[in-house]
Image: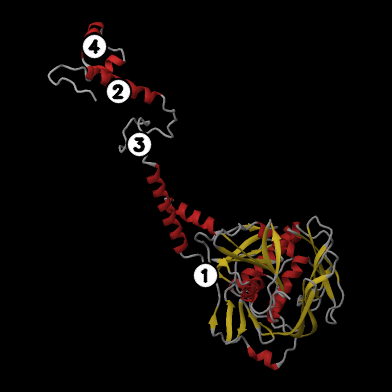
Amino acid sequence: MTGSRRPLTGPAAQRLAFGCLAACSVVSGLAPARPAAALPGPGLGAGPVETSAVELLDRAREAAETQSFDGMVAVVWRDGRDQHSEQVPVSSAGGVLRFGDEVVGAGARRMVHGTDGWFSLWGHDVTTLGPPPTAKYRLAVEPGPEVAARPTDVVDVQLVGADRIRERLYVDRQSGLVLRRELLDSRGDPYRSVAFTAITSGTVGAEAATAGAPGVIRSQEPVPARHLKAPFKLRSRIGTGYRLVGAYKAGGVVQQFFSDGLHGLSVFEQRGHLGAAETTLAGQSGTGREVEISGHTMRAYSASVGDAVVWDSDGMVYTAVTDAPWSDLAGAVRDLPHADPPGRLRRVAQTVVSLFRWR
Amino acid sequence: MIPRDPGADHLDDVLSAYLDDELAPAARHEAEAHLAACAGCRAELDEVSAARRAIRILPVHAARRPLVGTESGGLPGTPGVPRPPSRRRAVWALAAAVAAAIAFLLPRDPEVAPSLPSLADSHAARASITGDPLTQLAPIAVPVRFGP
């Protein structure tokens, strides 16, 4: 392994420190129920290093930002009875992670290629980390199968108190990269996965090695929102084990980002009501499906990035998106407002009442 | 109508008191003496008696609401006295019409069609900062399709 590691400075170093702190706390008191496997740490010299699943995942995140590699990744997801699969080339060099000609990650910057060039989705590091995954999950490490012809260790993820594995992460023993990540249904079959089908470590194409981060023509980066004015409201917790780790604003849309330590869940809020033309929600690609959550009918969508639910309530439109299993999303939605849309008579009544309301 | 002697003192208002048996004995004797002598007053007495009988045989209906004698004891048109029903109804109808007009004229919440691919990108970008960048970003590098 000849990974070129970029120096960690400022927030990045702080994040690593947080990670180490979390890992130490896990090792000291929150170790997985099963004994951790002895794994050679990437770049840590000879001799086995006792490690844990949390350390393994933390190291995988760092490896993705620092290791050099070329490869091909398959993204597979299920939407009802339909299964979709897409391949995307991926490379990393000089701290720049590149997915085809579409997406680039460089440090804390995230850029996406649009119709008129590159634009920035994210541009700053974060200091607030989510809760430790061991607060919600029981993580166990065991030797895994080969993925893309490379030996792995697999992290089995179970909810605390549950007897079913609902997620697996296959970590490259050599590079520390997550080579495969899959969410499992109740029968143990993967219904969404991201997996390397081929990878070459340490060498990248000349183009990728010298490309660097692309020039950005415009920014869509949200700005942090420490306080929100009504009708927006910050929520510290949501669903099962999700804690608020950041709130942001961009173009009239408020995003509250929650984490359970392993998955993210975003709740987007904007003033208004849903239009009748549901097809516009998903552009050209579909109308989703109706679901009922807490007795209210909403529209749900499944995609490569995860699941989404859209609904409106009391003059606000909510869109919840997550890479977590559907049950987590439904649990979070139950904690959010979901009143029936007011009818015309109710609107009139509300207006009359509001006319006589002092404040 | 029987003409009465304009120069004499007739009973006039005393007739009602006589019919109501409210006269003192001396006054009653005096009235009876006058009635015996005055045909005009006897005729008037008969008319008043007939009118009273006619009123007494009219059917009795309970008033829907008191026209006078409200809690404040005031008279119609004074504070505390309800206005006539028809006028109050008209006021309420007008208020309701104005409220309805305002409700329909007020700008409604804007119609929103969230761009799911864009929001999914934003979510993945944020999630990849604290999560695994490889598995978080790869899905948004493929065409984001929601639904079949």
Q: Is residue A324 visible?
A: yes
Amino acid type assigned to the residue bearing label 4 in the image: Ala
> Do labels 3 and 2 touch, CB within 8 Å?
no
> Do labels 4 and 2 touch, CB within 8 Å?
no
Amino acid type assigned to the residue bearing label 3 in the image: Val
- Residue A55's quadrant in the figure? bottom right
Q: Determine if marks 3 and 4 fall on one subunit.
A: yes
* Host chain of mark 4: B
* Sequence-earlier tag: 4 or 2: 4
Counting other residues with Cα less than 10 Å from the Cα at mark 3, is it few (<14), some (14-19), or many (20 or more)?
A: some
Counting other residues with Cα less than 10 Å from the Cα at mark 4, is it few (<14), some (14-19), or many (20 or more)?
A: few
Q: Nearer the viewer, mark 2 or mark 1?
A: 2
Amino acid type assigned to the residue bearing label 1 in the image: Gly
Return the residue at label 1: A252
Q: Which mark is residue B47?
A: 2
Determine the CA span between mark 3 and mark 4: 50 Å
The image position of residue A354, as x and y in percent, is 46, 54
Q: Which mark is residue B81?
A: 3
Counting other residues with Cα less than 10 Å from the Cα at mark 1, is it few (<14), some (14-19), or many (20 or more)?
A: few
Between B95 and A163, which is closer to the camera in this rendering? B95
SS of the residue under disc 2: helix
SS of the residue under disc 4: helix
> Do labels 3 and 1 touch, CB within 8 Å?
no
From the viewer's perspective, is residue A2 above or below residue B30?
Answer: below
* Host chain of mark 3: B
